[in-house]
Image (cartoon, grey):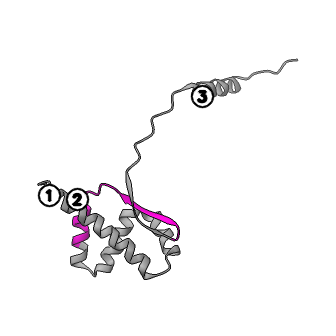
Amino acid sequence: MGARVTGTSARKKTEAAVSATETPAPKQAVEDRITLATIGGKDYTAPANVPFGLTLKYLDLTMRFKPQYAQIAIVKELIGQLAFDELTTSIKDKADWKQLVDAAADHLLGAAEKEAGQGN
């Protein structure tokens, strides 16, 4: 006797064949990012285009709290929580942290200056 094909088995084969021939969905555009610092062989990146509101948030945090608290909050927001978690285990000294913080501040304030220069 030959193998019997059940309705469920045939339906699964048909669904697999259809999904294999469908055109894949277009990939979402990848956000442009820049490298702020390389620490322990890992690049810590931030969005190339920073919303002006994030710059205002950084300045506000700096005025209301110690600058160190603002730096942590903004670095975490720029590089993302997962990268920040990795950073906390891979960073070896204050010089690495300073390099990252300085680059983040320059990136935020540079974006604000560029936007201000455009009359926005």
Label 3 neighbourhood size at 10 Å, few (<14), some (14-19), many (20+)?
few
Q: Earlier in the sequence, mark 1 or mark 3?
A: 3
Q: Residue furthest right?
A: 1
Label 1 neighbourhood size at 10 Å, few (<14), some (14-19), many (20+)?
few
Name the residue carrying label 2: 52
Between residues 65 and 113, which one lies in front from this camera angle?
113
Q: Position of residue 88 (x, y in %)?
A: 48, 74
Label 2 neighbourhood size at 10 Å, few (<14), some (14-19), many (20+)?
some
Q: Please state if 101 lies on the left or on the right of 3 as rendered.
A: left
Between residues 95 and 17, which one lies in front from this camera angle?
95
Residue type at mark 2 is: Phe
Circle 1/circle 2 CB separation < 8 Å: no
Q: Residue furthest top?
A: 1
Q: Please state if 105 lies on the left or on the right of 33 as rendered.
A: left
Instruction: Name the disc covering residue 1, or none.
Output: none
Q: CA distance from mark 2 to mark 3?
A: 44 Å
**Rendered-image quadrant of the N terminus:** top right
Name the residue carrying label 3: 20
Q: Position of residue 91 (x, y in %)?
A: 49, 76
Magenta region includes residue 51: yes
Residue type at mark 1 is: Gly
SS of the residue at dot 3?
Answer: helix
Q: Is residue 31 above or below residue 113?
A: above
Residue interval drawn in magenta: 40-60
Q: Which residue: 29% across, 69% down?
A: 105
